[in-house]
Amino acid sequence: MAKNVVEVAAAVAEAVKLCEPKIIPVYPITPQTHVSETLAKMLADGEFDGEMIKVESEQSAMAACIGAQATGVRAYTATSSQGIALMHEILYIAAGMRLPIVMTVVNRSLSAPLSIWNDQQDSFSQRDTGWIQIHVEDGQEAFDTQIQAFRIAEETNLPVMICLDGFVLSHVFEPVRFLTKEQVKKFLPDYKPEVSLNPSKPVSMGTLGTPEYYIQFRKQLQDAIKKSKETITKVNREFASAFGRSYGNGLIETVNMKGKKSALITIGSVAGTARELIEKESIGLIKVKSLRPFPGEELAKACEGLESVGVLEKDISLGGNGALYDEVKAALYNLEKRPNVSGFIAGIGGRDISLNDMEMVIKKIKSGKEGTEWVL
Amino acid sequence: MTLNEGAVVKEPGSSKINKTGSWRTFRPIVTDKCTGCRICEWYCPDSAIKVKETGGKKKAVVDYDYCKGCLICVGVCPQKAIEQEKEKR
């Protein structure tokens, strides 16, 4: 199929449309709005068969997703920033009930001070909720991963959030190669859950977990999300053989690593900025695609033999470090020869990460420095 | 309880499997003043009281596997026939 020059948010909406969710409960919030607005138009124009519920808050949006998905249909929503923060309580319930809801998070900073601009504090802070959390770099990856998300969710019975950077990615026009309805139908089988709400065969979902059982359910969920790595890599492989596009192994992507002593580790659209420099600067790039499940073993393997790595992220776990920095460091601890690890907090609240910033970061990584610093 | 994904209970009646008697702090004790009027049976929120007939006399019988000790039965008994006693553990 020919490439379409589209706004990335519209490409995401197109991908969602092709997966035909039956229920879309949404509450408007910038910069997610273009995704749900485009879907609303598609529904009004009869492009696919579904229903949008205009709810009174994001907490209600996620609650409605749970109710809808429990009846045995696909539910989808999109949100950002304060919206996902308001969903927090319900995110745990969606995961605990093992409902394969799919959500797009258009990443935006959290108030206060009020900011509509991009960073990844909003989705990063939901990393303990039991959701699979996958970040994308560009429009094509957003389109493709959004479709994969439904497969991954439905094969693992885990909810999946696809995260893309607000404005710097969501509002950018890029050439994106779409798939046809028939292609997606072949790749994504009909959703037929083993258990769903049905008056003729009553079930209870997400019931009381007394102390004898609750911990076992939590372990079951942890085992499932750890095991979902296999599904994510499999879906990435099958997508590649069907449509000729893949993104690393689905969990991480390594670029320009051969013979390099250092690597820059990052996540989301800023990997695109890094690609401009890595060859000139003779440094490797490791793009983390899946934050949850965290690809610790894969990262350790990719970093084997390196002298230094640096983690650049648009997140800060206040009172700690950047969350990605901490996790990368923990993942590398068991390496026989550990590389030095530096951390860079950058791009928070929509501050541009320029090529000059990136050059400075790369120089520092190559120098083997350790510890975290802010790029201001 | 079986560990179905998502804490799903696929068949009705799971409340029988989960015995709740250990939650009890106070134990209701039905005395001989009981006339078997069944008011406590109707009020019991856990369906843990049944009036049974033994030797021609009707009497309320508490199922201590499920009685949580809310003591609603003590309050509603018109004969004041149900006493309470602190559980000893």
Image: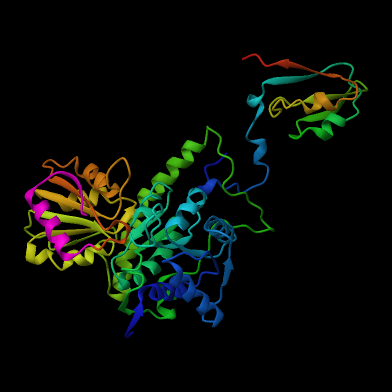
State how the image is colored. Answer: rainbow
Instruction: Provide the residue span drawn in magenta.
Output: A353-376
**Quarter assignment of residue A105:** bottom left
Q: Is residue B24 left or right of A217 when viewed as pictured?
A: right
Residue A375, x across and y down, in percent: 20, 54
Q: Quadrant of the C terminus of chain A?
A: bottom left
Q: Is residue A43 above or below residue A228?
A: below
Furthest residue in direction front, as rendered: A113
Name the residue rendered at 27%, 72% in the picture. A245
Residue A363: say if magenta. yes
Residue A358: say if magenta. yes
Of residue A108 and residue A21, the one placed in the foreground of this image is A108
Is residue A158 at all visible to an observer of this figure?
no
Q: Is residue B17 above or below residue A298?
A: above
Q: Is residue B49 left or right of A121 when viewed as pictured?
A: right
Name the residue rendered at 88%, 30% in the picture. B38
Q: Is residue A125 left or right of B20 when viewed as pictured?
A: left
Residue A161, x across and y down, in percent: 41, 59
Residue A26, x across and y down, in percent: 53, 65
Residue A366, x across and y down, in percent: 8, 53
Is residue A243 at all visible to an observer of this figure?
yes
**Quarter assignment of residue B1:** top right
Name the residue rendered at 12%, 61% in the picture. A359
